[in-house]
Image: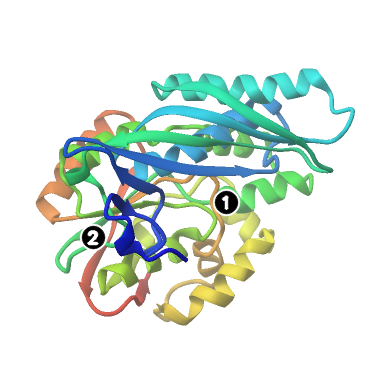
Amino acid sequence: MFPIEDYPALLVGLAEPDDSAVYRVSDEQAIISTVDFFPPVVDDPYSFGAIAAANALSDIYAMGGEPLMAINLAAFPDGFDRAVMTEIFRGGAEKVREAGAVIAGGHTVTDREPKYGLAVTGTIHPDRIKPKGGAKPGDVLVLTKALGTGTITTALKNGLAQSDHVAAAINSMSRLNKISAQAANFYSVNGMTDITGYSLLGHAHEMAHLANADFMIHVGALNWLPGGINYAQKDIFPGGMHRNQSYFGQWVKFDSGVDEVVQGLLYDPQTSGGLLMSLPPDRAAMLADDLHAAGEMVAVIGEVIPGNGYLHVSP
């Protein structure tokens, strides 16, 4: 690995894990670079394209930046239906356009399973980067969007999901984190990340660990997608839930009143989830009010206390 000190313009790289790489090009501007792609999580090709694009764009928003352009990344089997392929690309392109960015190219390879996503380039002022590890004791934790996409999409794959539950999950997964990120910038959040495959607890641990703090998380404050708890009660979880639980569980302390089903849901991998932000209580209240007024799902879910990366989860 190249020594980080040899690249002083690389403001965010491999030294500390974050949501995107950031490279300073001037005193007033830095470039954000990220990439994400995955197999279909829903049946409708247009929705899959939109979800995959929103998920990739989210890492730009999680740094506090604005997307500039995106490059398609795709894999399809030989003989794959071109009409389906076109709908996937259309869903992605329209979501990128909604973000105020543009598709500027792409690359496709042959693979046994379809996959789609984006490499995204964004911009940010070097002094306004929202680091994953910026939380401070005394801050409160604010989470946008509802949880439960992993168990709902797993139920869909197994033919067990209700159509209204799937529709609500698609609506959430394809919703950009743009408005939430703009509010985070306006209210100068101290730390921020997006909730994706490592689950709420996995990504919360990353934030707490990098901030040298502990997080208190209150389950009763969380928002859940319709059907998520129902499928979890039937033990319908993606395999990633158990991997998250096995690894991140060493840093999680559950109070006795936290139901085991809910514990599983807190390790549920999310696709294109919301933003987890840390900021002082007075600014958090104003941020939450503004996001509610803008039609965003948002909740104050906990507090930051002195510590070393542990999560304390209460009912």
The quadrant of the picture occupied by the C terminus is: bottom left
Asked if marks 1 and 2 touch (Cβ < 8 Å), the reply is no
Q: Is residue 191 left or right of residue 47?
A: left
How far across and how far down the image is residue 104, in percent?
A: 52, 22
Question: CA gap, disc 1 to disc 2?
Answer: 31 Å
**Residue pictured at 63% horizontal, 62% vertical:** 240
**Residue pictured at 32% horizontal, 60% vertical:** 6
Q: Is residue 63 visible?
A: no
Residue that extends furthest to the left in the rendered view of this protein: 282
For the residue pair 172 and 56, the one nearer the viewer reads as: 56
How far across and how far down the image is residue 65, in percent?
A: 31, 37
Marks 1, 2: nearer the viewer: 2
Q: Is residue 249 above or below residue 112?
A: below
How far across and how far down the image is residue 176, in percent?
A: 43, 32
How far across and how far down the image is residue 141, in percent?
A: 27, 57
N-terminal-most mark, 1 or 2: 2
Q: Amino acid at mark 2?
A: Gly
Disc sitting over residue 134 in the figure? 2
Q: Is residue 36 left or right of residue 292?
A: right
Q: Secondary structure at mark 1?
A: helix
Q: Amino acid at mark 1?
A: Gly
For the residue pair 32 and 186, the one nearer the viewer reads as: 32
Crowd band around label 2 with a 10 angstrom C-alpha radius: few (<14), some (14–19), many (20+)? many
Q: Secondary structure at mark 2?
A: loop
- For residue 83, which quarter of the picture? top right
Disc sitting over residue 228 in the figure? 1
